Image (spheres, rainbow, N blue to C red):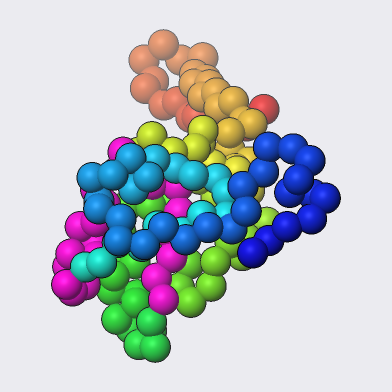
Amino acid sequence: RASGDALDQGYFFEPTIFADVDNGDKIAQEEIFGPVLSVIKVKDDEEAVAVANDSMYGLAGAVWSNDIERAKGIAERMRTGTIWINEHHLLGPEHPFGGYKQSGVGYEMGVDGYRAYQAKKRIHVDANTDPNAHFTFSLIFSQ
């Protein structure tokens, strides 16, 4: 059991595992940003993917397996912005991080994260003074 001054002074939740959760339970359908694990029993990979995708949220998920190819197959079918295989919450600044569905507020980090700060403008210029010519070129600026 976790304890100490940090937990005793403030609104903190100690690491908790909820066993035998039903996929319809609120705890299975909400995003919990804390040290909480909800355990939902499934029959096979197909049901696991169905449970993972049966949420209005999709910020991130993880697949744990001794069979990496099997884990990749499961990860490819999950509708989340980030999926870790045999690890959790490792992030690199070169990779975008953001959610699917109702999770997140766009992407941060990586090229996709930087694009959120760009305004694109397309300018068409008729470079020919001959009114009978139909040649134009485009310049694309990122500001």
- Can residue 60 be seen here? The reply is yes
- In the drawing, does residue 63 fall left or right of residue 73? right
Please say if 141 is above or below 51: above
- In the drawing, does residue 30 fall left or right of residue 126? left
On the image, the x and y values in percent for residue 71 come to 34, 77
Residue 124 or residue 67, whichever sits in front: 67
Q: Quadrant of the N terminus?
A: bottom right
Q: Residue furthest top?
A: 131
Residue found at x 62% / y 31%: 118
Residue found at x 38% / y 82%: 65
Residue 78 or residue 138, whichever sits in front: 78
Q: Quadrant of residue 141?
A: top right
- In the drawing, does residue 12 fall left or right of residue 102? right
Please say if 64 is above or below 60: below
Q: Which residues are magenta?
A: 43-64
Please say if 92 is above or below 13: below
Residue found at x 68% / y 37%: 11
Residue found at x 74% / y 37%: 10
Q: Is residue 140 magenta?
A: no
Q: Quadrant of residue 18?
A: bottom left
Q: Quadrant of the C terminus?
A: top right
On the image, the x and y values in percent for residue 26 come to 33, 40
On the image, the x and y values in percent for residue 116 come to 58, 33
Q: Residue furthest bottom?
A: 66
